[in-house]
């Protein structure tokens, strides 16, 4: 057999990754170049809100082909946040589900397949089966990035997603207080254990700015996420403020990056999207020059 040697090719961040390549390990779903997990060690820190606004910012601001997978089986929120209802159609050619497009993003969630108020009373094997169908059982087409809204915690579902999907990287979301950061550390260490690159740590609900007087209140503390990022050798990717507009827009199904593009929160999410792209580029440059064997 003939063996050919060639170096991996890295893209420049200045191109804004209009054609993103799978840099880290190579996404395991055909047609998808990179898969990025948005994760937290616990619920209630704004992980889904971050995932939604990141996905929309990547699509609208960065002009990429983006998918959004709601992997939080027990608490799917993407249907509400992206204002999507109804069941996905099935591609007759391969009998795979067709994702539902919203705000320029291809979406898939267990919430599309069950009733709005139906409880998901499933054991582990059923959850694993559902996740498999929502990843490889979906006709994603050609995507630059698939953003995965991970379930909270570090259990079977999180490990299976991390290992089976060959994630390009993981983004850790936390609020500033210690009780959230303890779990964020656990989440980061889980990804390191399964050799998934950590793109960085984002601090959500960093501060509240009074709409009347403009005074900032650090309700959940100040600087905790930045300190944790430094201690764990992770990049600190920025702060998302605590704003009523973020909550109201999420409830209405119109992400703040669309409904209020000039707001501080919207600019923070778009800045986060740029940083995620740059981190993916860095991962590619880190591999540049390593030989690839083709048989």
Image (spheres, grey):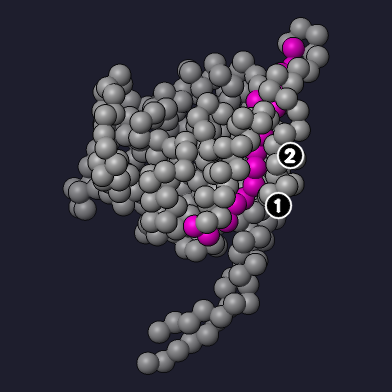
Estimate how packed mark 2 is, as few (under 14), some (14 to 19) or many (20 or more) residues with alpha carbons within 10 Å.
Answer: some
Question: Looking at the picture, how far across and down is residue 188, in whole percent?
Answer: 58, 47
- Observer able to see residue 266: no
Q: Which residue is mark 2?
A: 226
Closest to the observer, 2 or 89: 2
Mark 1 or 2, nearer chain start: 2
For residue 117, what is the image quadrant? top left
Question: Looking at the picture, how far across and down is residue 250, in whole percent?
Answer: 51, 22
For residue 261, what is the image quadrant? top right
Question: Looking at the picture, how far across and down is residue 169, in whole percent?
Answer: 55, 53
Estimate how packed mark 1 is, as few (under 14), some (14 to 19) or many (20 or more) residues with alpha carbons within 10 Å.
Answer: few
Q: In which quadrant of the rendered image does the N terminus lie?
A: bottom left
9 left or right of 149? right
Residue 197 on the magenta span: yes
Q: Which residue is mark 1?
A: 233
Question: Mark 1: which secondary structure?
Answer: loop
The magenta segment: 194-210
x 66%, y 53%: residue: 278
Q: Is residue 138 above or below residue 40?
A: below
Question: Looking at the picture, how far across and down is residue 206, in whole percent?
Answer: 70, 27
Q: Is residue 167 above or below residue 286?
A: above
């Amino acid at each position: 057999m003939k063996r050919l040697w060639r170096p991996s090719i890295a893209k420049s961040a200045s191109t804004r990754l209009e054609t993103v390549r799978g840099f880290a390990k190579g996404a395991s779903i055909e047609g998808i170049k990179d898969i990025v997990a948005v994760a937290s060690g616990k619920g209630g820190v704004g992980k889904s809100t971050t995932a939604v606004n990141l996905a929309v910012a990547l699509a609208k601001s960065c002009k990429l082909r983006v998918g959004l997978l709601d992997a939080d089986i027990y608490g799917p929120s993407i249907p509400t946040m992206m204002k999507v209802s109804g069941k996905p159609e099935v591609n007759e050619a391969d009998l795979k589900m067709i994702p539902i497009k919203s705000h320029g993003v291809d979406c898939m969630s267990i919430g599309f397949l069950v009733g709005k108020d139906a409880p998901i009373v499933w054991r582990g094997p059923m959850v694993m089966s559902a996740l498999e169908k929502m990843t490889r059982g979906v006709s994603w087409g050609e995507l630059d990035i698939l953003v995965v809204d991970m379930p909270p915690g570090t259990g079977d579902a999180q490990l299976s997603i991390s290992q089976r999907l060959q994630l390009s990287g993981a983004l850790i979301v936390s609020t500033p207080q210690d009780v959230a950061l303890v779990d964020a550390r656990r989440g980061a260490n889980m990804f390191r254990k399964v050799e998934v690159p950590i793109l960085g740590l984002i601090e959500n609900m960093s501060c509240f700015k009074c709409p009347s007087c403009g005074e900032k209140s650090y309700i959940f503390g100040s600087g905790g996420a930045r300190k944790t990022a430094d201690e764990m050798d992770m990049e600190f990717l920025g702060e998302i403020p605590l704003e009523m507009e973020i909550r109201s827009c999420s409830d209405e199904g119109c992400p703040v990056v669309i409904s209020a593009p000039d707001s501080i929160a919207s600019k923070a999410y778009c800045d986060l999207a740029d940083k995620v792209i740059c981190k993916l580029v860095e991962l590619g440059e880190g591999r540049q020059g390593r030989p690839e064997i083709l048989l």
